[in-house]
Image (cartoon, rainbow, N blue to C red):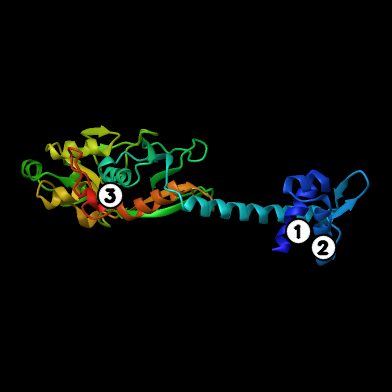
Amino acid sequence: MDSLNGIAFFVQAADTRSFSEAGRNLGVSASAVGKSVARLEQRLGVRLLHRSTRSITVTPEGALFLERCRRVLGELEAAELELSHSRQAPQGRLRVSLPLVERLVMPALTGFMHRYPAIELDLDFSDRLVEVIEEGFDAVVRTGEPHDSRLMSRVLGHFQMRLVATPEYLTRCGTPLTPADLAGHACLRHKFPSTGKLETWPLQPAPDQAEPRVPASMVCNTIETLLYGVLDDLGIACLPDFLVDAFIDQGRLVSVLEAHLHFQGTFRLLWPSSKHLSPKLRVFIDHMVENLFKPGAVADLSGQAIRNDSDYR
């Protein structure tokens, strides 16, 4: 403890260039500060401060030691703050960016709001690749691999892509047996809002076949619009399993060309790198990891969640 006091006294003396001023800031006498710094110098075997009748200055060795001392005291202060926060109920505003997959994320988000009513969620739904730090987001949900070294991340879950159509459409237009057969079908395609480019369907043709031609009878920039279209017998769409598996189980949709699809996506939660997470962000991260891909926790088309609210309380 005497070492920590010596470090604190040395930092104050170095910053104020005065034992008297350092003593007033610390609530002790100038003599106590001077003696503490002297004991620290004796223990280290090096002079940290030059003293004169008018002021004190930091030696070259003291300047190097000063930076390390500031980091030590900063870590102690942060640790105390973290412990203090841990005793408080999480509260405050949390700004989060999410992709346009409301049916996947809304049950987890509404469950979070029931569980932590003192936290205000500010949700930004967009397929735009936001700048997390520059735009002031506390956290973002994204697919793919993270490439910003300034961000921390947790995996939320994995998903597959499926080619789906209604039984009525397949009865009317036939079931494609190879990727090449898609050329004769109505295909509902997704385009990226930021670039306007069509999303490629992850099809792998047979070794003796060319890349399949996938026509576009409808193009839109939200995948949930494609789901409405495919459920209304308009054609075949390539959609993530968390949107369509329940409809496949109900017999409302049929998965086709499964042997030719090769894709696995990953949802991640990312946030600005920091050793000291606020309580509101820590509980949000833990809740999303635990609940985003919880079985049955996907909203139906009317927006009602297929889960029990009490699971989140």
Q: Which residue is mark 1?
A: 6
Q: Secondary structure at mark 3?
A: loop
Q: Position of residue 263 (x, y in %)?
A: 31, 54
Q: Secondary structure at mark 1?
A: helix
- Which of marks 2 and 3 precedes in the sequence? 2
Q: Which residue is mark 2?
A: 39
Q: CA distance from mark 1 to mark 3?
A: 75 Å
Q: Position of residue 212 (x, y in %)?
A: 25, 46
Q: Nearer the viewer, residue 12 or 194?
A: 12
* Mark number displayed over residue 210: 3
Q: Residue at x 39, y 46 (%)?
A: 142
Residue 208 vs residue 235: left or right? Answer: right
Q: Secondary structure at mark 2?
A: helix
Q: Identify the image quadrant of residue 187.
A: top left
Is residue 247 among the parts visible in the rendering? Answer: yes
- Which of marks 1 and 2 precedes in the sequence? 1
* Mark 1 vs 3: CB contact within 8 A: no
Residue 200 vs residue 57: left or right? Answer: left
* Tag nearer the camera, 3 or 2: 2
Is residue 144 among the parts visible in the rendering? Answer: no
Q: Position of residue 4 (x, y in %)?
A: 70, 60
Q: Amino acid at mark 1?
A: Gly
